[in-house]
Every structure is written in structure tokens, then in C-alpha cells.
Image: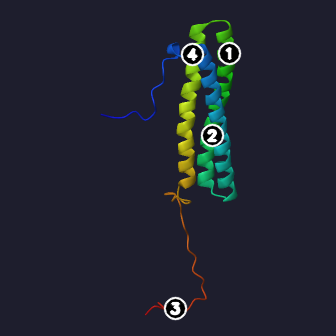
């Protein structure tokens, strides 16, 4: 029996409107905190001048920014839908925020892995050319 990686989402139709508003606001707060945290990791990678870590963390940061933006819009639409008593719209927008929160949590872990990566990688297309100065004494000095 496999255990789910992320907890299953509660059916939006079973969550009272007041709870939808409270939970989406809380989720957005958590996502913004993750955004700040990952921005710090990007800065850390930038300070160490590690391009691999920087690119990796930056990619995660970009995705998190997008999810936060989507969630902010969804929360606004959720508030409007609840005020107008449009349950299908409110359920849809609430679900968007909850899914985004799970994805942001996953991206946070991936960003932490980026920073924990080895600071080097080999490039299989790397070509090294060695030039031997002409004024070196002949023969093998180890013999």
C-alpha cells in the first residue's frame, strides 16, 4: 500500500464559505512566506557565485511567484463569488488556492535541494587543451 505524497484535498463543496475564506487567506500567507524563503536561497546562491545553484533556485522562484499570483487572483474571485453566493465559482477558486499551496510546498523542497546540490557538474562537451612550454627540460622527471 502506497501512502500519498501530499494529503488529499478536502472536497471544496464540503468546506463552509467562512472556512474557504480563512483557509485560502492562511494558504496565501504560507505561500508568501515560502516565496520570501526561496528569494533568500536565490540570494545565497548569487553571493556564492554558484551558477548551477542560482539557476536551479531561480527556476523554482519563478514558478512560486506565478503560483502566488494565481492564488492572489483566485482569492479575490473567491471573495466575490461567496458574496454573490456562486458556489461553483467559489469552490473552483478555493480549490485553485489549495492546489497552488501544495505545489508551492513541493517547489520549496526542490529549491532546498538546489542549494544542497554539489557546487560543480561536469559538462560532457567540455574540451581541455594543454599547451606544453618549449623551454621544459626533456624526459620524464619522475624517473
Rounded to the nearest whole Å, what is the CA distance between mark 1 and mark 4? 12 Å
Q: Which residue is mark 4?
A: 92
Name the N-terminal-most of marks 4 and 2: 2
Q: Residues within 10 Å of mark 2 (few under 14, many from 20)?
A: many
The residue where tag 1 is placed is 79
Q: Which residue is mark 3?
A: 138
Numbered disc 3: secondary structure:
loop
Q: Is residue 77 left or right of residue 104?
A: right
Between discs 3 and 4, the one toward the N terminus: 4
The tag earlier along the polypeptide, 3 or 1, is 1
Q: Within 10 Å of the Cα at label 3, are there few (<14), some (14-19), or many (20+) other Cα atoms?
A: few
- Label 4 element class: helix
Q: Nearer the viewer, mark 3 or mark 4?
A: 4
Coordinates of residue 17 in the picture (x, y in percent): 60, 14
Where residue 39 sits in the image (x, y, percent)? 67, 45
Q: Measuring 45% from the left and 27% from the top, which residue is drawn there?
A: 8
Quick one: SS at disc 1? helix
- Left or right of 143 in this view: 119: right
Q: CA distance from mark 2 to mark 1?
A: 23 Å
The outermost residue toward the top is 85
Q: Residue at x 43, y 93 (%)?
A: 143
- Across and down, in percent, residue 36 comes to 68, 42
Q: CA–CA distance between discs 3 and 2?
A: 62 Å
Q: Which residue is mark 2?
A: 34
Dots 2, 1 in contact, CB < 8 A: no
Amino acid at each position: 500500500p502506497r501512502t500519498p505524497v501530499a494529503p488529499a484535498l478536502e472536497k471544496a463543496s464540503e468546506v463552509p464559505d467562512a472556512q474557504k475564506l480563512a483557509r485560502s487567506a492562511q494558504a496565501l500567507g504560507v505561500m508568501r512566506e515560502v516565496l520570501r524563503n526561496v528569494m533568500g536561497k536565490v540570494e545565497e546562491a548569487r553571493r556564492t557565485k554558484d551558477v548551477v545553484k542560482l539557476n536551479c533556485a531561480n527556476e523554482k522562484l519563478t514558478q512560486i511567484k506565478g503560483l502566488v499570483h494565481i492564488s492572489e487572483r483566485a482569492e479575490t474571485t473567491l471573495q466575490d463569488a461567496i458574496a454573490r453566493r456562486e458556489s461553483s465559482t467559489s469552490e473552483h477558486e478555493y480549490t485553485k488556492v489549495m492546489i497552488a499551496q501544495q505545489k508551492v510546498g513541493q517547489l520549496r523542497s526542490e529549491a532546498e535541494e538546489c542549494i544542497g546540490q554539489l557546487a560543480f557538474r561536469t559538462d560532457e562537451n567540455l574540451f581541455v587543451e594543454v599547451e606544453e612550454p618549449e623551454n621544459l627540460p626533456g624526459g620524464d622527471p619522475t624517473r
